[in-house]
Amino acid sequence: MESHRTASGLAIETSGLSRIFRARRGGRDVLALDGVDLRVHEGECFGLLGPNGAGKSTLIKILTTLLLPTSGHARVAGFDVASQAREVRRRISLVSGGDNAGYGILTTRETLLLFSQFYGVPMPVARARADELLEMTRLSEKADTLLSQLSTGMKQTLNFARGFMSDPQIIFLDEPTLGLDVEASRRIRGFITRWVRECPGRTVLLTTHYMMEADELCGRVAIIDRGRILALDTPQALKRSVSTERLYELQVGTAGGPLDGLRSIPGVHAVSQHAHPESGGTQLRVAVEDDAVIAEVLGLLKRDGRSVIHLTKMEATLESVFIHYVGRGLADESREEGEGA
């Protein structure tokens, strides 16, 4: 569709955006967004990183007109999401990873063409665009296969492709490579990069749990937790901002006491932990003020009967930035109340 450029040059703009989910029957209200101010420029691939329950999905639902804000304002493509929702919808698309919904009686090609007609794309243009997307996603051989007969991974890949059938001005990609294999993920990242580069003004807002993906694709990223933006800059600048902090990765045995006491050690800024995929032990990532603090960490682990199998000092990465601001890693199980990822 014809691009609508804004006078401000902003694809997305929010001011004091908040959303409260009211509790029922005497429960506790949930503040999902707390005064979010955000500016995404036209032509950007912008990343939004946060743990489960941080407010990412609520923010995307508001920006895509699926949910009204409790207070504050948001404009997408220059239009107010509350009072000008129809104009916003004409210019956006949304892809949610893991969503493979569709009509099983349609073929792969028919599914793409159907979604193009929702946006009034001329059929000759739609057919050419469908062929391009089928080729990119390696689904050409399945073009005439019923959707109900596709594998889960193929359905998810098709879901990604259909988001581009309208040639949106702004696309919201919510975990687009979730559950896809390495090769499929690589193709999708390459397509996103080309799609933004080919036409000035095309804009992507990406959420992902894969830090490498955000680092590769995004010119700027924001870290959100508990409904607030904690940091926003280029990946390089964010990594420089925590370069004075040391991040260590430790693999420890399963035997021994709880690991909660690590956070109480002076000089320990954050601790992330999850099961090691091979050994079955625990993998720790500990951000410390200086190298001397790691000796205190090792001492506490020893006193608690925890054997240290492996210890590595890590260079600054987006993950270490995330741990610095949020206090835990994306791999950790989130027990916070609130809305989903």
Image: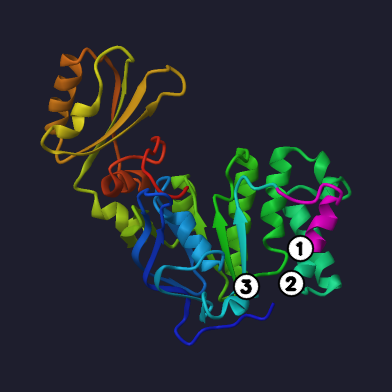
First in sequence: mark 1 or mark 3?
3
Kindly identify the amino acid type of the residue bearing the numbered disc 1: Phe
Would you place residue 283 above or below residue 245 in this image? above
Q: Nearer the viewer, residue 39 or 316?
A: 39
| Residue occupied by mark 3 | 89
Tell me where residue 173 appears, x and y as whole percent.
56, 57
Q: Secondary structure at mark 2?
A: loop
Q: Secondary structure at mark 1?
A: helix
First in sequence: mark 2 or mark 3?
3
Which colour style is shown?
rainbow
Tell me where residue 106 appears, x and y as whole percent.
86, 52
| Residue occupied by mark 2 | 119
Kindly identify the amino acid type of the residue bearing the numbered disc 3: Arg
Span colored in magenta: 101-114
Task: Kindly identify which numbered label has been placed on residue 115.
Answer: 1
Q: Nearer the viewer, residue 66 or 185?
A: 66
